[in-house]
Image (cartoon, rainbow, N blue to C red):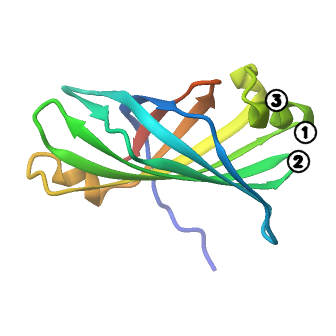
């Protein structure tokens, strides 16, 4: 089969996000791994030409798969400075050396460069002005701090 001549999609900056989080609720070890729920307290998003605040009430549903890897599924709502609401679902993978992951799980600071943290956020909104974000694919990178998660999102062009 001949190689297809398809373009490599560019990455275009979309937004920077900072999410304040509470202490985890640990369900414990299940047959899938260690289940945790981290409540989302608030935060802010800065995009090109608009900003938003993260509303309290969402959560990050985590599965600690093994000593090196966690699968994350965060769901929350943001409200733009214009009053539009956007539902966000952000799936992520976080991997690091076992000692670094243990520190993260205990809520201790670690150097962001010691952790592979990649995500794929998706957005739903009734906003006519921002409706285009429901029709695009986004990826991002992040860092976990003791009291917050910071991320940078890119639209895949």
- The residue where tag 1 is placed is 98
Q: Position of residue 23 (x, y in %)?
A: 62, 35
In space, the residues marked 1 and 2 are separated at their CA atoms by: 5 Å
Disc 1 to disc 2: CB gap under 8 Å: yes
Task: Residue 42 in the image: state x and y as whole percent.
Answer: 39, 32
Q: Is residue 22 visible?
A: yes
Q: Which residue is mark 3?
A: 103
- Location of residue 29 (image quadrant): bottom right
Residue 153 appears in which quarter of the rendering?
A: top left
Q: Residues within 10 Å of mark 2 (few under 14, many from 20)?
A: some
Report whether 81 appears left or right of 34. Answer: left
**Residue found at x 17% / y 54%:** 131
Task: Provide the residue designation for mark 2.
Answer: 67
Residue occupying the far bottom of the picture? 1
Give the mark nearer the N terminus: 3 vs 2: 2
Q: Is residue 8 visible?
A: no
Q: Which label's residue is closer to the chain start, 1 or 2?
A: 2
- Whichever of callouts 1 and 3 sits on the residue coming sooner in the sequence is 1
Q: Secondary structure at mark 2?
A: loop
> Compared with residue 41, is residue 84 higher up or lower down, i.e. above or below?
below
* Residue at 34% over, 29% down: 45
Give coordinates of residue 106: x percent, y percent. 78, 32
Q: Are marks 1 and 3 in contact (CB under 8 Å)?
A: no
Q: Nearer the viewer, residue 39 or 156?
A: 39
Q: SS for tag 3?
A: helix
Query: In the displayed structure, does residue 124 sit left or right of residue 60?
Result: left
Place of residue 99 in the rendered image (x, y in percent of width and height, measured from the top left): 91, 32
How busy is the neighbourhood of tag 3: few (under 14 within 10 Å), some, or many (20 plus)? few
Gap in angstroms between the C-alphas marked 3 and 2 = 11 Å
Residue located at (75% from left, 23% from top): 108
């Amino acid at each position: 089969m001949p190689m297809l001549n398809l373009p490599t999609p560019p990455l275009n900056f979309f937004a920077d996000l900072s999410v304040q989080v509470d202490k985890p609720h640990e369900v414990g070890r299940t047959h899938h791994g260690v289940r945790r729920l981290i409540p989302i307290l608030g935060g802010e998003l800065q995009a090109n030409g608009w900003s938003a605040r993260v509303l309290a009430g969402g959560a990050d549903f985590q599965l600690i798969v093994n000593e090196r890897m966690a699968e994350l599924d965060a769901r929350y709502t943001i409200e733009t400075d214009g009053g539009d609401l956007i539902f966000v679902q952000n799936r992520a993978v976080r991997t690091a050396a076992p000692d670094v992951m243990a520190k993260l799980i205990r809520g201790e600071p670690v150097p962001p460069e010691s952790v592979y943290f990649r995500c794929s956020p998706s957005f739903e909104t009734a906003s006519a002005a921002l409706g285009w974000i429901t029709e695009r694919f986004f990826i991002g990178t992040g860092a976990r701090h003791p009291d917050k998660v910071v991320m940078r999102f890119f639209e895949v062009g």
